[in-house]
Image: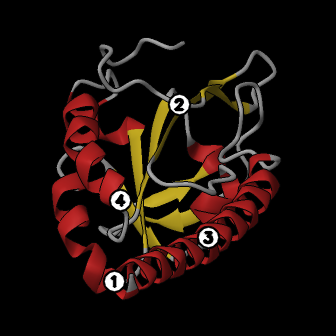
Amino acid sequence: MPLLIAVVALVGTLCTVNLVLTLGVIRRLREHTELLGAVQGEPLRLEVGQEVGDFDTASTLGEPLVRDLVTGPVLFGFFSPTCEPCRDKLPRFVEHARHEPGGRSSVIATVVGDADAAAEFVSELSEVAQVVVEDSDGVMGTALGIRAFPSVLRAEHAADGRLVVVDGDVALGRPAGLTA
């Protein structure tokens, strides 16, 4: 009989601990759901048809990058060295950029983060793009409303001359030059 009492007490204790942990997990899931709900209301990048904001900066090689000097379609890529999906998407972006009709001058890649941490990304991207390294509140990210990484957009001049986004999430598997 004492063994049966001990087993029932142990099972009861385990059930109580399980219940407390489950309630804790449910509470955390509700908090995360609220946080995600707040973020989902904000777009992660400019949407199709929206005008690209002003930018005036220089590439890592000193090339001037100014919105008003962009003459043709341009592919924008945004990456962060601390982002694992960025590491996965970077080789596909580089391969896609190799086949851009305007060549390197029609591709602008922005690496967001510390210059030392960004060095590996800059090395890979420099062959196929004009590369900018900036902080999270930098001019390129602000001009394109970037709030998530990786982000790949395509912009072209509209009939009225404004530089607008024509593809807000470029599929890197499609041939370069095709828009959504």
Residue denoted by label 3: 19
The residue tagged 2 is 169
- What's the mark number on residue 3? 1
Q: Earlier in the sequence, mark 3 or mark 4?
A: 3
Say what secondary structure mark 3 lies in. Answer: helix
Of pointers 1 and 3, the one earlier in the residue sequence: 1
Mark nearer the viewer, 1 or 4: 1
> Where does the image place residue 88, in percent across and percent down from the top left?
24, 48
Which residue corresponds to the image point at 58% horizontal and 59% vertical from the top-left? 140
Nearer-N-terminus badge (2/3): 3
Amino acid found under the numbered disc labelled 2: Asp
Q: CA distance from mark 4 to mark 2?
A: 19 Å
**Can you see residue 13?**
yes
Tell me residue 174's x, y (percent): 33, 15
Left or right for 170, reference 165: left
Q: Is residue 73 above or below residue 36?
A: above
Give the colour scheme shown: secondary structure
Q: What amino acid is at disc 1?
A: Leu
Q: Which residue is mark 4?
A: 131
What is the residue that sits farthest to the front in this orientation?
Answer: 1
Amino acid at dot 3: Leu
Which is more toward the observer, 50 or 3? 3
Identity of the amino acid at label 4?
Val
Per the model, the C-alpha gap separating discs 1 and 3 is 24 Å
What residue sits 79% from the left and 52% below the top? 37
